[in-house]
Image: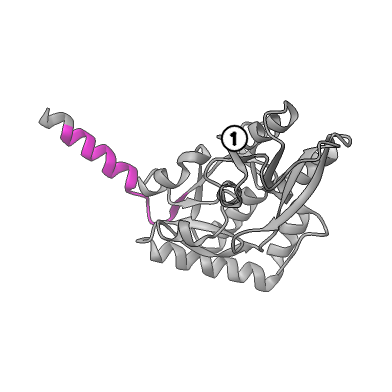
Amino acid sequence: MKSLLIAGLLTALSINIATADTVRMGTEGAYPPYNFINDKKEVDGFERHLGDELCKRANLTCVWVVNEWDSIIPNLLAGNYDTIIAGMSITDERDKVIDFTQAYYPPAPSFYVALDGANADLKSGVIAAQTGTIQAGHVAATGATLVEFATPDETIAAVRNGEADAVLADSDYLAPIIKESGGKLVQVGEVYLGDGIGLGVRETDTALKEKMNKAITSMKQDGSLNKLLVKWFGADVKTY
């Protein structure tokens, strides 16, 4: 029993140890265009390109780790990776548990989306949202009936099959889905939530936070962050 305990402790320590020039970037890999898995089975999207550039400017090597959304904060705290870069909005509630860099994506609206002609009741109807998101928290606070799903795809499916009257999610995630639906899905409302999107880090990782903040600032100053935002979200995206 003691040998098993020691082995477990050594394993836990090895998970938490990262080399001085390597940072493990935790992402969901299922939230395009922020992050997704491409045909080569690699992490791709806005945050992959942003993260690689931030690591380059901070003289770090990025190692990408995919983790399901509903456990993404606990696994950061457990030491399974060093950052969260997964379309995570900066909120006071999350900031009590982890720390954030400055925002690399400005505050943007969340859309309510429903089937065309469904006359969705956003105040007292059934609204779908992904588990653990600021959208789920907002729906719960409005008095509507919240139905939560582990993945964003499942929230859309819930609207399509009549399980939910509408879905609430980031506008940049929903906009292409609306377009691809051929008029079957429509925006029926919007709300602004959170203080933009930043990298999540453990509260003890102040040096890493400082390095990433410096890199984000340099990208804002030279315009390269704006170029990435426009590339992945279109000319109408809010920039710095």
Q: Give SS at disc 1.
A: loop
Instruction: Tell me, yes or no, whether the highlighted magenta stretch contains residue 93.
Output: no
Q: Quadrant of the C terminus?
A: bottom right
Which residue of the protein is positioned furthest toward the right in this rendering? 182
The one of 42 and 189 positioned closer to us in this rendering: 189
Magenta-highlighted stretch: main secondary structure? helix
Vertical arrangement, residue 129 with respect to residue 88, above or below: above
Quadrant of residue 42 within the rendered picture: top right
Residue 88: percent from left, percent from top: 56, 52
Quadrant of residue 238 within the rendered picture: bottom right
The residue drawn where x is 40% and y is 56% is: 97
Q: How many marks?
A: 1
Which residue of the protein is positioned furthest toward the left in this rendering? 2
Residue bearing the label numbered 1: 151
Vertical arrangement, residue 89 with respect to residue 80, above or below: below
Q: Is residue 66 visible?
A: no
Q: Which residues are magenta?
A: 5-24
**With 117 as the anchor, is 172 left or right in this view?**
left
Vertical arrangement, residue 9 with respect to residue 4, above or below: below
Amino acid type for the residue under numbered disc 1: Thr
The residue drawn where x is 40% and y is 66% is: 207
Which residue of the protein is positioned furthest toward the bottom in this rendering? 221
Q: Quadrant of the N terminus?
A: top left
Residue 194: percent from left, percent from top: 59, 60
The residue drawn where x is 45% and y is 40% is: 71
The one of 116 and 61 positioned closer to us in this rendering: 116
Residue 27: percent from left, percent from top: 54, 44
Residue 227: percent from left, percent from top: 75, 61
The one of 121 and 156 positioned closer to us in this rendering: 121
**With 177 as the anchor, is 57 left or right in this view?**
left
